[in-house]
C-alpha cells in the first residue's frame, strides 16, 4: 500500500475513534482561502469550443494534509469533462499546478496561468467565486411547519421516542455520532426523525459538512435525507467527484443525480424537495429534488402506497450541521 493511502487510513481510523460532536469545532473557512470555485476565461483561442465560449473554471479542495485536489473545467456543475484533474502538493495559501501542459499558481483571489489545448498554448485568468445558492437563507413562508429554527429539537426524536441527543451549535443542529464509543455507551447519537408524519409537501433544509482532510468517498460528509417509505436523498461531500449513484443528490443507489451540484466544504447548501404522495386514483409518488438551485430529479415517479411520511436525518458518523428546516404541506388533490 502506497504511503499516501496509509496516511489516509490513519486519518480515518483516528477520526472514527475520536469523533463525538461534543467539543468538535468546524474548521474556519478563512483558513482555506483557496478552497472552492474559481471562474475566468481563456485568451486567444482559435480552435474548438473555447473559440466561441472562452470560459474556464476551477475547483480546489484539500485532499489530505499537504495536498490539494485541483480540477480545471470548461463549466461548473454540469458533468463537464475536466481539462485537468490532479492532486498536487500545496498549502492553504499556495497551490502550484505544473502538469500536462498546464501551469498556474493558486495564491490570493486572482491568478493567471497557461494551458495547452488543441495544440495551442493559451493564457487564462481565474478569480475566486463566492458560493451563494439562491435558496440558502430562505425564510419559511406563512403557514409553514417549522421543523428546526435553531432553538430546539421539539419536532424530532430518536427511536422509539427518545429525546434528541445531537447538539445545537449557534443556530444549527450538529450530529453527535453514535460511532464514537463514549457516545454509544452514554446513549448519545443515532438517526433522528420527525415526531409527526406529513402529506404531500414542499420541503426546505440547509446543511454543511466539515473539511475532513484525509477522508474520501463515503467516509466524508456522509448523511442522508430520508422521506420514510419513499427513499433516501444522499447527503455527501461529493465536491469535485463524478456524481455516482451513491453520491450527493442521488436517490441512494437507485438513481444518480442529473448533475453533481455538491458545494465545497464549510459552505451552507440547500435541498429543496417537492413531494406529491399517492392519490386515490393510484398515482405514484412524484418527487422533484433541487440541490443549490440545480434540478437533480424532475417529477420522478416512485412506487409508494403511503399518504403520509416522516422525515429522517441520518447519523453516518460525520459531523454535519443542519439549519432552517421547514415544509409546507400541499392541499389535498394537488397535482
Image (tube, rainbow, N blue to C red):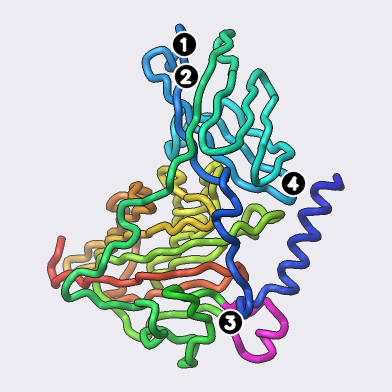
Magenta residues (range): 176-188
Q: Secondary structure at mark 3?
A: loop
- Taking the spot 46% from the left edge, 11% from the top edge, the residue there is 45
The residue wearing badge 2 is: 42
Q: Secondary structure at mark 1?
A: loop
Label 4 or label 3, whichever comes before in sequence order: 4
Observer-nearest of 63 and 106: 106
In this view, the residue farthest toward the front is: 108
Rounded to the nearest whole Å, what is the CA distance between mark 4 and mark 1? 34 Å
Q: Secondary structure at mark 2?
A: strand
Q: Nearer the viewer, mark 3 or mark 1?
A: 1
- The circle drawn on residue 189 is 3
Residue 164 horizontal/vertical position (percent): 49, 86
Label 2 or label 3, whichever comes before in sequence order: 2
Q: Is residue 51 positioned above or below 238 on the image?
A: above
Q: Secondary structure at mark 4?
A: loop
Rounded to the nearest whole Å, what is the CA distance between mark 2 and mark 1? 7 Å
The residue wearing badge 1 is: 45
Tell whether position 178 is magenta: yes
Would residue 276 appear left or right of 244 to someone viewing this image?
Answer: left
Tell whether position 167 is magenta: no
Label 4 or label 1, whichever comes before in sequence order: 1
Would residue 284 appear left or right of 75 to someone viewing this image?
Answer: left
Observer-nearest of 169 and 228: 169
- Image quadrant holding the C terminus, namely bottom left
Q: Residues within 10 Å of mark 3 (few under 14, many from 20)?
A: many
- Taking the spot 56% from the left edge, 62% from the top edge, the residue there is 222
The residue wearing badge 4 is: 66
Amino acid at each position: 500500500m502506497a504511503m499516501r493511502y496509509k496516511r489516509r487510513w490513519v486519518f480515518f481510523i483516528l477520526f472514527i475513534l475520536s469523533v463525538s460532536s461534543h467539543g468538535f469545532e468546524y474548521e474556519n473557512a478563512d483558513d482555506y482561502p483557496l478552497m472552492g470555485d474559481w471562474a475566468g476565461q481563456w485568451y486567444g483561442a482559435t480552435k474548438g469550443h473555447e473559440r466561441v465560449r472562452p470560459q474556464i473554471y476551477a475547483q480546489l479542495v484539500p485532499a489530505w494534509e499537504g495536498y490539494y485536489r485541483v480540477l480545471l473545467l470548461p463549466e461548473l456543475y454540469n458533468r463537464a469533462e475536466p481539462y485537468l484533474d490532479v492532486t498536487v502538493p500545496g498549502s492553504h495559501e499556495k497551490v502550484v499546478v505544473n502538469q500536462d501542459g498546464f501551469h498556474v499558481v493558486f495564491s490570493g483571489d486572482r491568478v493567471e496561468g497557461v494551458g495547452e489545448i488543441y495544440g495551442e498554448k493559451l493564457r487564462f485568468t481565474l478569480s475566486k467565486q463566492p458560493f451563494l445558492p439562491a435558496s440558502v437563507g430562505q425564510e419559511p413562508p406563512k403557514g409553514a411547519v417549522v421543523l428546526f429554527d435553531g432553538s430546539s429539537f421539539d419536532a424530532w426524536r430518536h427511536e422509539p421516542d427518545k429525546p434528541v441527543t445531537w447538539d445545537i451549535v449557534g443556530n444549527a443542529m450538529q450530529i453527535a455520532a453514535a460511532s464514537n464509543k463514549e457516545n454509544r455507551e452514554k446513549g448519545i447519537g443515532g438517526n433522528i426523525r420527525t415526531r409527526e408524519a406529513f402529506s404531500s409537501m414542499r420541503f426546505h433544509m440547509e446543511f454543511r459538512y466539515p473539511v475532513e482532510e484525509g477522508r474520501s468517498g463515503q467516509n466524508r460528509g456522509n448523511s442522508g435525507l430520508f422521506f420514510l417509505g419513499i427513499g433516501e436523498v444522499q447527503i455527501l461531500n461529493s465536491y469535485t467527484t463524478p456524481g455516482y449513484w451513491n453520491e450527493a443528490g442521488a436517490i441512494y443507489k437507485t438513481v444518480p443525480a442529473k448533475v453533481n451540484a455538491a458545494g465545497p466544504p464549510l459552505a451552507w447548501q440547500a435541498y429543496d424537495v417537492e413531494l406529491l404522495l399517492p392519490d386515490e386514483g393510484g398515482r405514484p409518488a412524484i418527487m422533484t429534488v433541487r440541490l443549490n438551485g440545480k434540478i437533480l430529479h424532475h417529477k420522478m415517479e416512485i412506487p409508494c402506497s403511503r399518504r403520509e411520511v416522516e422525515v429522517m436525518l441520518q447519523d453516518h458518523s460525520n459531523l454535519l450541521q443542519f439549519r432552517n428546516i421547514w415544509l409546507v404541506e400541499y392541499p389535498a388533490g394537488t397535482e
